[in-house]
Amino acid sequence: MNRTPANILDRPLGGRGTRSAESNVSQSAFAYLYSELVQYHQSRVASISELERRLESSGYGVGLKTLELLSYRARESKRETRLMNILQFVSAQVWKSLFGKPADSLERSIDHADEFMIVDYEPLTSTYVSVPSDLGQLSADAFISGIIAGVLDGAGFSARVTAHSVALEDGEGSASSNPSLPPKKDKAVFLVKFSPEVLKRDASLDR
């Protein structure tokens, strides 16, 4: 009995999960396309912040389509209503679908009840992209923050999502999936700040 070849929409971008290499989209192809996307927007902006907004906007549409695709695969007819559940969905199912593995951690801010952090020690968008010195403050992972925002907005959880590069502490992180690359010195932290309406709605469901 012959297996039907997997549709490309069923393949994650990353090759760090348990699936075989044949089921993953080529990382070199993605790296090339993403670098072209960055250069395309870079030639049309006047500031780093504007470039990051454009990358976020590009990722936003991907997030909306990813939510639609995963909902179709799961044949889910009901929408998620709880805040923590949608964050776990993003950091687990969405991450695994796109990058071949779950995010490394999901954390809640100690100081701000409306803020959560999704951590990835080896984000695909910055692992293979070298930021030039004149763009030293650019977060190449802004594209992923746009994806997160798209998924959350599409699910009815409006939030502002920003990407940050944070230095790794001693002993923190995991072994690189590509030994040919130099050890990473930082991690990507995606800060999710929910709107007051979302927090109020979630609190009302606890009553």
Image: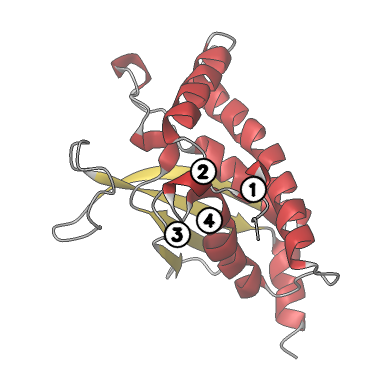
Q: Position of residue 108 (x, y in %)?
A: 47, 69
Instruction: Name which quarter of the figure residue 43 lies in.
Output: top right
What colouring style does the render use? secondary structure
The tag earlier along the polypeptide, 4 or 1, is 1
Instruction: Name which quarter of the figure residue 178 lies in.
Output: top left
The tag earlier along the polypeptide, 3 or 2, is 2
Horizontal side, residue 6 vs residue 165: left or right = right
Circle 3/circle 4 CB separation < 8 Å? yes
The tag earlier along the polypeptide, 3 or 4, is 4
Q: Nearer the viewer, residue 142 or 110?
A: 142
Q: Name the quadrant of the N terminus.
A: bottom right
Total labels drawn: 4
Vertical placement of 19 versus 45: above or below? below
Mark 2 neighbour class, 10 Å CA radius: few under 14, some 14 to 19, many 20 or more? many
Q: Which mark is residue 162?
A: none
Q: Position of residue 92 (x, y in %)?
A: 53, 65
Give the Cα separation between the discs numbered 4 and 1: 23 Å
The tag earlier along the polypeptide, 2 or 1, is 1
Say which element carries label 4: helix
Residue at numbered disc 2:
13
The answer to whether residue 114 is seen in the rendering is: no
Say which element carries label 1: loop
Residue at numbered disc 3:
103
Residue at the left extreme of this rendering: 170
Circle 2/circle 1 CB separation < 8 Å? no
Q: Residue at x 46, y 57 (%)?
A: 19
Q: Residue at x 39, y 52 (%)?
A: 16
